[in-house]
Amino acid sequence: MNDSFIVVLVLHFIWCTMKKKLTYQELEAQVVELKEQSALLQQQLELANQITSQSLERTQLLQTLVDTIPSPLFYKNTDGVYQQCNDAFAETILGIDKAKIINKSLFDLGEYIPHELAEIYHAKDLLLMRNPGKQVYETSVKCADGSIRIFSFYKASVLGDDNQILGVVGVMLDVTELKKKKTELKEKNRRLETYSMTDPLTGLYNRRKFNSVFPDNLRAAQRHTRLLNFAIIDIDNFKKYNDNYGHVAGDNALVTISNLLQSKLLRADDYIFRLGGEEFGLLFYADDEIMASQFVSDIRLAVQELAIPHKGNDIYRYVTISLGMVTIKRTDKDMLDLYKMADDLLYKVKRSGKNQILTKLV
């Protein structure tokens, strides 16, 4: 406030006092009072200017902070009209200047936001308007550069001092790479799980998988009308085969026989395992004992018909297999008991000439 303004006030009071015919002392007192009021008014004006300046600085600081955040931010009022947003929202999501967004609704930005998406976003905003709180959801968003990215939306209702809804604030977090990494990690874990259950040479399930599957099938067999069968298969005189033809040839023979065994499985709940070395486990269902015996007999003949030369296989000229099998009808035996029973049957076959099958109903 300048001196001329004070002079005007003084003259105004002098005129007023002249009308009232004040004494000189009274006039002087009012002039002093007027100066004091003027000084107070000057202080108040300076304080107001300072507060306004500080408020403007805080607003500018807040906007700078918001624009520095790489995640898109926005604020809408109760009419769904954008009141504020940051650079990331304007540039990354819509690809336009903020000035073209402020004071516009989703439906006013049809050139940048498809109408069907605008309706979806608006419906979610309305939920926060009617039921104040927080909202989190994930969706795909077509960005300004044409790429489709996955964003997690974190939104909340904005309330005034009287708890009246003022609008909705939202933050968009780009989780595209995170989702990709999670998918890759899930796939890697799946592969590791597969590898941990698979024999690396033959590709068949290994003993670990066998120990997992057999008990489950044994429990399920009690509810089935079909018979669960477990056979241990052993390649006859395989040590002599390796001694005569070498371990590479031995590995090739194992792979060939494994492929044959795998191809003989008829149902999704039939399993073939490599239990170790030249020993395999066969777990399958059959309608009765005769069909079970016929199934393993076909497998034994199929291996012999591969005609893999084996000059050390006693009276046979080719690679053959022996089998010991238990057919499980009604039993309280556990996996270890049944395994020992099948192994004992296999041992008897080995002692009696090989290339045979011995079965037992339990």
Image (cartoon, rainbow, N blue to C red):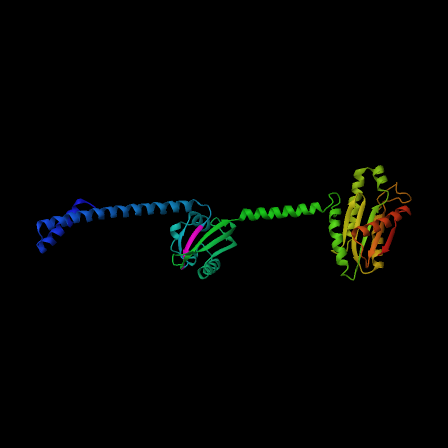
Q: For residue 208, say whether it is visible.
A: yes
Percent position of residue 99, x then y: 38, 51
Q: Which residue extends farthest front? A: 25
Q: Position of residue 50 (x, y in %)?
A: 29, 45
Residue 228 drawn in magenta: no
Question: Up-down: is 314 above or below 217?
Answer: above
- Magenta region, residue range: 73-78
Question: Can you tell which quarter of the image residue 169 is in?
Answer: bottom left
Query: Would residue 206 be seen by someone viewing this image from the given angle?
Result: no
Q: Principal SS element in the magenta part?
A: strand
Tell me where residue 71 appears, x and y as whole percent.
47, 47
**Measuring 36% from the left and 46% from the top, which residue is drawn there?**
58
Relative to 311, does residue 114 appear above or below in the rendering? below
Depth check: 201 or 175 in front? 175
Was residue 76 drawn as part of the magenta stretch in this picture?
Answer: yes
Classify residue 74 as left or right of residue 313.
left
Q: Can you say which quadrant of the picture contains the C terminus?
A: bottom right
**Is residue 322 shown left or right of residue 181?**
right
